[in-house]
Image: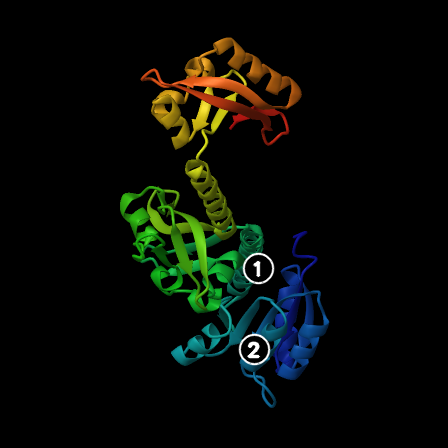
Amino acid sequence: MSTQEQKTILLVEDDIVKSKITSEIVKDFGFNVITANTGEKAVEIALSNETTSLILMDINLGDGIDGTEAARQILKKRNVPIVFLTSHSEKEYVEKVRQITHYGYVIKNSGDFVLKSTIEMAFELFESHEKTHAHEELLSIILNSIGDGLITTDTNCLVTKMNRTAERLTGWMINDAINKPLSDILKIYNEKTLVFVDNPAEKALKSGKVEHLADHTILTSKDGTEYNIADSAAPIRNKEGKIIGVVMVFSDITEKCLMEKKLFEQYTSLQNLKESALDPLVMINLEGKIVDTNIAAEKVTGASREKLIGSDFTYFFTDHQKAREGFMNTLKQGYVSNYPLAVRHLNGKVTNVIFNASLYQNADGLPAGVFVV
């Protein structure tokens, strides 16, 4: 037993004779054995000797603390499998053991095979728990590294897990949120209608598909702070494809929404300024096509905005060639000022105008077109 040779078992038994006999039996199984005859000594050894891999603990240890109390003190400081030894099989003893550890107990004098099997199963169970704990710890690290909020629920929409981002945005700590209805934790409403939004997790459970929130969704935190969020809810399925819960993923897009609002306000201001101008304003791309204009341009040409946009800008000038030259000079020089031209209205009326133009650039600093006043 190459794996067992490296494992040490702490045997806690106040009866010297029984301790010696049990110790020899356990050694024959291939384990190293350390002994203690009191609960206090067991606690001291278990907490000072890191090589102890498992504890065989007698429940009744005479004077001093008993085996169950010794086990409690050890487990407060260290995670180690503890198997109880007892002469009792009454329900009260079984329940007493269950409250402390789930690695079982052995009735004394039940045979070497039972003792050995119990020890081996305790090791297997402990190693399985350790792997599960390591997996859960890794999962927790990953979840808490995600910038988006994440909440999982069971099929009753009760919260089962959430990451730190979700805690920050909702204002709820996981220990307080666990087993509470998602609707109590994730309070969301539509910014436009001011109506509370239906629980997206319930929608995902019913549809069996990914559900997305509509735009303009606001999350109200526990402390009243509000966030613009983008959200999705997806059903969680087991290996058999059965839905066992829902995962909610939501991101804080408050800054993005504020920026979009600011840009929209700036755009609206520019549009209002453009439309209130008394002079015709025209934006022309590098191909000479009109891409935007204002009401004053519609009035002087007699053409609607829809007809003007996309048309060649020279169309409404009486001298197409001269208008083209003014445009080309703007592209070469960057601007043209006080350039006389005449515009012909659709009804034939001619209006003399002064062509003032400048080159405008795109976000990369490259020429994008000509702005004409």
Judging depth in this view, the residue of 216 and 289 nearest the camera is: 289
Spatial distance from mark 2 to mark 1, Cα to Cα? 19 Å
Q: Is residue 349 above or below residue 79?
A: above
Q: Can residue 38 be seen from the camera position used here?
A: no
Q: Which residue is mark 2?
A: 72
> x%, y% of residue 138?
58, 52
* Residue shown at 71% from the left, 67% from the top: 50
**Residue 35 horizontal/vertical position (percent):** 68, 75
Identity of the amino acid at label 1?
Phe
**Would residue 347 be found to the left or right of residue 26 on screen?**
left
41 or 135, nearer to the observer: 135
Pointer 2 or 1: first along the chain: 2
Q: How is the image coloured?
A: rainbow
Label 2 residue SS: helix
How busy is the neighbourhood of tag 2: few (under 14 within 10 Å), some, or many (20 plus)?
Answer: some
For residue 130, which quarter of the picture?
bottom right
Residue 90 at what x, y percent from top left? 40, 79
Residue situated furthest bottom in the rendering? 63
Disc 1 is placed on an element classified as helix
Does residue 90 sit above or below 137 in this rendering? below
Residue 12 visible from this viewpoint: yes
Residue 70 numbered tag? none
In the image, residue 280 sits, relative to residue 236, either above or below, namely above
Q: Which residue is labeled 1 in the image? A: 123
